[in-house]
Image: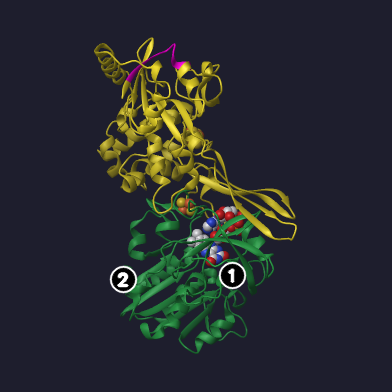
Chain colours: A green, B yellow
Amino acid sequence: MVHNDYIPKLAHILEIKEEVGGARPIKTFRTQFQNKNDFSFRCGQCAMLSVFGKGESMISISSSPLVKDYLQFSILKMGRVTSALHEMQPGDIIGIRGPYGNGFPIKDWKGKNLIFIGGGIGLAPIWSVLNTALGKKEEYGDLTLIYGARTSKDLVFREELEEIKKKIAVHLSIDVEESDWNEFVGFVPQNVTDKKPSPNNAITITCGPPIMIKFVIKALEDLGFKDEQIYTTVENKMKCGIGKCGRCNIGSHYVCKDGPVYSWAELKKLPQEY
Amino acid sequence: MEKILTKKSFPQWVKKLSLYKIYAPVRDNDICNLEAIDNPESIDLDCSNTVLSPKKIIFPQREIYLEFETSDENKLQVKEILPEETPSVIFGVRPCDAKALTLTDKVFSGDFKDPYYWKRRNSTTLIGLACNIPPSPNCFCLSVGGSPHSKEGLDILMTDLGDKYFVESLSEKGSTLINLAKPLFQQPKAADKKAVEKTQAEAEKKIVRQIKDIKKIPSILENMFDSPLWDKESLSCLRCGICTYLCPTCHCFDINDEVSSSSPVKGKRVRTWDNCQFPDFTMHSSGHNPRPDRSSRLRQRILHKFQYFVELYKDYQCTGCGRCISKCPVGIDIIEVLDKVSDYGS
Ligand SMILES: Cc1cc2nc3c(=O)[nH]c(=O)nc-3n(C[C@H](O)[C@H](O)[C@H](O)COP(=O)(O)OP(=O)(O)OC[C@H]3O[C@@H](n4cnc5c(N)ncnc54)[C@H](O)[C@@H]3O)c2cc1C
Ligand code: SF4
Ligand code: FES
């Protein structure tokens, strides 16, 4: 049999959790393959999810590779496929192919302080690496999470965040004032400037909307972080996930295969086409 | 293996290949199409080059990946669909189009081998036809490492010598086809070989269009991402996508589900050619578009072919067939654009 990368493996949805409601809803899906297979992934990799009859979407795997019982995805409702996913129920069948992309180079980060900076749904790719680092806390230095969203209702993983607060420093923010909010009010980059994480022996991992990433990088540079210490993920429209369909490229890089994780040092050298 | 085949015997050779599916140029008034044929007499090797290259057979415009269906027990079933490995022969392949397949070969190889492409590719034998007269006034194969009698990517090369063809086998696949009709072929004489050499030398002289400074282009382009040239050159582009659909090297595709019933769900997942000249090619659901205008899309077409592809595979992603020039409704001419690129570099 020839290996065919385009054929997804079937999985059922175990559990669906509503993270965020309203006009830009986010749900978290835990899924399990129907048959045993060799799907193993690294933090920061993605999978192409299928809703048969609707199509495919590239989604970051938000669970840690340390978790073996399920694969987790947190999905913002956008168009055809993601809307169909939002209508699904536990027990429903989806397709999964992958994993795709390079993932975070966490092997190189042993012994370092890790600062995670996320905005909105951008916590999804961070979640995998954050939980992996938490699971092997002795291998890393201090862990810090700086995370924000438009309103307190737009923050994902809220229950889990309460748990994590007991173990590491977590700095949350919302864009505009709310009556019972005791943490930072303002944009994520401003919170970064406010909390002044030290660049000493540190790596930052930042994911979120492009505009947020841009200003977070600026804030980090002002704090003395070097380009090599800043990691981010790039999102370009994708179809194949394997460097053939030709739409996700930035210069000669195919984000689906050579990305989505880039250090700022690498990304800076590429044309601004993302 | 070198042989002579008279033009009169050509249809008999094709008849001997009854185990193969045969594709060949067929004339339809003024245009020539590459079609599956039953009757060897319908083959027209005097045609100019076909509207679409053999890409349309190896990497068809629509390819079914899989079928999905809900069973009676309400279980979703997914069935992989792979193309049948039908032994096929394509006649009349121009050297530029054969070279183009060696380029798409690179894209569909690598860490992820594309089974659809390779099933078709491996079961196809390519019989080339040297261009004694350039089939298009816009041919420029000589500028991009090709020639009107290049053998690259071919299994057989045929050269027209008036009332006969000089037939050169270039692979085992090619020799097999000749051996199936051995008695039809004769040994070439010294005069035949001389005639081939002369024809080929003359053919090269008939190619008039060329890119000024092709060797320098990739490195000049590295510094031209933000150049105003792209704005200027793309101003008249209609975004029709003809340039890339007709290109023998363009390989971009879309993947979509075609549904024959939504509930219970039943349908097919298909890939279809897509096009970097279309605005929604790169547009996210959010509306954000990394290539929002004609200018950035023309730049992508040129940079992909003459910078990015060179970085990845050490070759231009262009074989000089001239289709994009001849068929662009507003006359955007890739040679002129590249010549302006050279001017920027000097
Ligand atoms: C590397 C990567 C990781 C991602 N991770 C997540 C995640 O964890 N959670 C999440 O909610 N979203 C994520 N996205 C975005 C998500 O892929 C798109 O929102 C989704 O594909 C939209 O599909 P749709 O069918 O709902 O929308 P439609 O507008 O109907 O989209 C049509 C098709 O276009 C493509 N497409 C459109 N927008 C995008 C886009 N921004 N990125 C990639 N393909 C696109 C898809 O193939 C989609 O099927 C990620 C994107 C990338 C590239
Ligand atoms: S063929 Fe011409 S008009 Fe059409 S997309 Fe290409 S450059 Fe634009
Ligand atoms: S998604 Fe097809 S090339 Fe990257």
Residue at the farthest front position: B183
Rendered location of residue B146, percent (x, y) = 32, 30
Chain of the residue under label 2: A
Is A16 rendered above or below residue B262? below
For numbered disc 2, what is the local secondary structure? Answer: loop
Is B301 rendered above or below residue A195? above
Asked if marks 1 and 2 fall on the same chain, the answer is: yes
Give the residue type that dot 2 points to. Lys
Rendered location of residue B86, percent (x, y) = 52, 36
Judge depth for marks 1 and 2 and give the one in front: 1
Rendered location of residue B291, percent (x, y) = 47, 49
Q: Give the range drawn in magenta.
A: B3-11
Chain of the residue under label 1: A
- Judged left or right of residue B218, residue A240 is right
Q: Disc 1 to disc 2, how far (Cα)?
A: 40 Å
Q: Look at the image and tell me whether residue A212 can be seen.
A: yes
Residue A226: give its label. 2
Q: Mark 1–mark 2 contact, CB under 8 Å?
A: no
User: Which residue position holds label 1?
Assistant: A32
Q: Which of B53 and A9 is in front in this view?
A: A9
Residue B33: give its label. none
Residue at 52%, 47% (x, y): give it.
B281
Residue A105, quarter of the rendered image: bottom left
> Disc 1 or 2, which lies upstream in sequence?
1
Is the CB of the residue bearing disc 2 within 8 angstroms of ligand 1? no
Is B155 rendered above or below residue B219? above
Q: Nearer the viewer, residue B30 or B118?
A: B118
